[in-house]
Amino acid sequence: MNSEPSDTAARPKVLTAPNLVTAMRLLLLPIIVPCLLKNEPFFLLSSFVLLAFAELSDITDGYIARDRGEVSKIGKLLDPLADSITRVVIFMTFLAMDLVPFWMVLIFFLRDISIAYYRAFAASEGFVMGARLSGKIKGALQSVASLVPVLLLVVASQQELLATPASRQAYLWVVIGGSIAYWVYCLYFRFRGGMLLLTSGLFLLGLAPFLVMYWYTVPAFDAKVWIYWLVLTAAVYTAYSLVDYTIGFVQAMGWDE
């Protein structure tokens, strides 16, 4: 009897649930970007819902992989790649919308390119550059700086979104539909414990502004100013993270001795 593993069994599993969840971030970009560039109330609302799902996938794909026993090398490669591409593309879209200056987007791009080079070079020399705290904080800040600006644009367009009974009904359908899809996702992957608390808290945090908008008139404000300072905060910390990783890279190579 041949005990050799079959070709099918020997091949690594690529189309696993966590890998598909990670890939979802990239697959949503061709929809999110045109909606943002359209820069009209319901397109902005739709882009926020889709971008929220992209960020949800970023938070949960690692949990899903561990929970289902489907941690893979390709998943470890695809996750940070999807993060970098998604956020840089979103910030480039903000640039195209004249919401942020070019130099901010350049910082995000240069940081990710530099860290990728550091890790590749360190690996070629037999060293492993692990994640650093500054990288985790950078990721959280960039997540906020990519999602919240879209929310601010939606809130700023409240009058147009809720101008007529028909538009109010459409608004409710989008919010309710997005909420149902969110919980179907959470229930399908059987989130529990800390992950369930986290996703529940994020859901309530994200839903609150839309409930407020529906029942109360939000005072007029300049969304562009708030967006500028949000992205600036993320850009400054991203620059710090690059310096921090550069120091770590030099130390890993032993060049500081």
Image: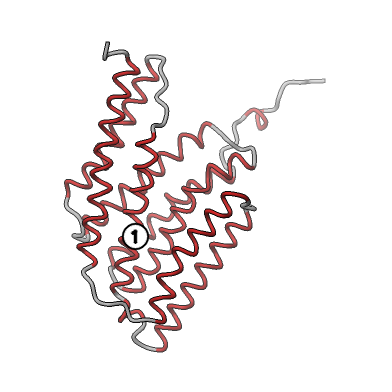
How crowded pointer 1 is (Cα within 10 Å; few <14, some 14-19, many 20+) is rated as some
Question: Relative to residue 215, is residue 237 depicted above or below?
Answer: above
- Write the residue at 52% across / 71% down: 177
Side of 6 where 40 appears, left or right: left
Residue closest to the far top: 257
Percent x, y for residue 65? 58, 41
Percent x, y for residue 166? 42, 87
Q: Quadrant of the N terminus?
A: top right
Percent x, y for residue 201? 51, 59
Please give the residue where the numbered disc 1 appears in the rendered image.
148
In the image, what residue type sits under mark 1? Val
- Write the residue at 37% across / 81% down: 216
Query: What color scheme is it?
Result: secondary structure
User: How many numbered discs?
Assistant: 1
Percent x, y for residue 241? 29, 36
Q: Which image quadrant for residue 230?
A: bottom left
Question: Relative to residue 58, is residue 114 depicted above or below?
Answer: above
Which of these two is toward me, 182 or 3?
A: 182
- Write the residue at 39% across / 24% down: 129
Which of these two is toward me, 100 or 33?
A: 100
Q: Quadrant of the C terminus?
A: top left
Element under disc 1: helix
